[in-house]
Image (cartoon, rainbow, N blue to C red):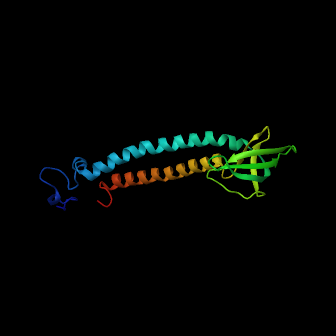
Amino acid sequence: MTAPLVDSRLRRTSGRCIVRPVTALWRRRPFRHVVFGLIPLLVVGPVLIILLAVHLADESAPVRAATSQATATVKRSGLGSDHRGIELTWTDSGGTQHTSTVHSARPATVAPGSQVTVRYRPDDPGTIFVTGDDTTSRLADLTFGIVLSVPGVPTVLEARHRTHSTGTIPGV
């Protein structure tokens, strides 16, 4: 007679295996905390990413439509009660001279005579965009929010995978 493949001395008399059943694992408080902590992250994370992406698409539409560029000269800066206004003069592709005021993201003192690149829509040169103005700063913030949100999802999924593959929480 050959030896059995499984040493029956390691089996409990109750017929259960050495490995703890899932119910015993569920009774452990840290395991429950991780599971209940992952659920909101797995739901809220993708929803947050989708909302930020939709908002980014809406906010960036006017900037994407501004396909023409011109070089502008700073006339005055620090305008307005918040000192964020910058007055620029520039010439569009048709040769028309424009004077525009943009609002920087922060109070600014730009030297008069400085050159900046403006973007504008050829059919609506009244609206211009300059790197560092309110709109481009808002777009940078939205992009940064998406970048911060996206790595959280793979991290949560990796922790979930480790928990399910080993049956225990890593490091606990």
Q: Quadrant of the C terminus?
A: bottom left
Horizontal arrangement in the rendering, residue 51 relative to residue 88 (left or right)? left
Residue at 14% x, 60% y is: 9
Q: Using the rendered view, name the quadrant where residue 110 is placed.
A: bottom right
Q: Residue furthest top?
A: 123
**Frontmost residue, 37 versus 130:** 130
- Residue 27 in the image, given as x and y percentages of width and height: 22, 48
For residue 78, side relative to residue 149 (left or right) = right
Residue at 46% across, 50% down: 153
User: Is 107 or 129 nearer to us in this picture?
Assistant: 107
Q: Residue at x 62, y 41 (%)?
A: 59
Pick whichever, 137 or 6, lies toward us. 137
Q: Quadrant of the N terminus?
A: bottom left
x, y percentage for residue 120? 75, 44
Residue 95, image x, y percentages: 88, 45
Q: Is residue 98 above or below residue 166?
A: above
Looking at this view, name the residue that lies furthest to the right. Answer: 95
Question: Would residue 158 appear left or right of 83 to someone viewing this image?
Answer: left
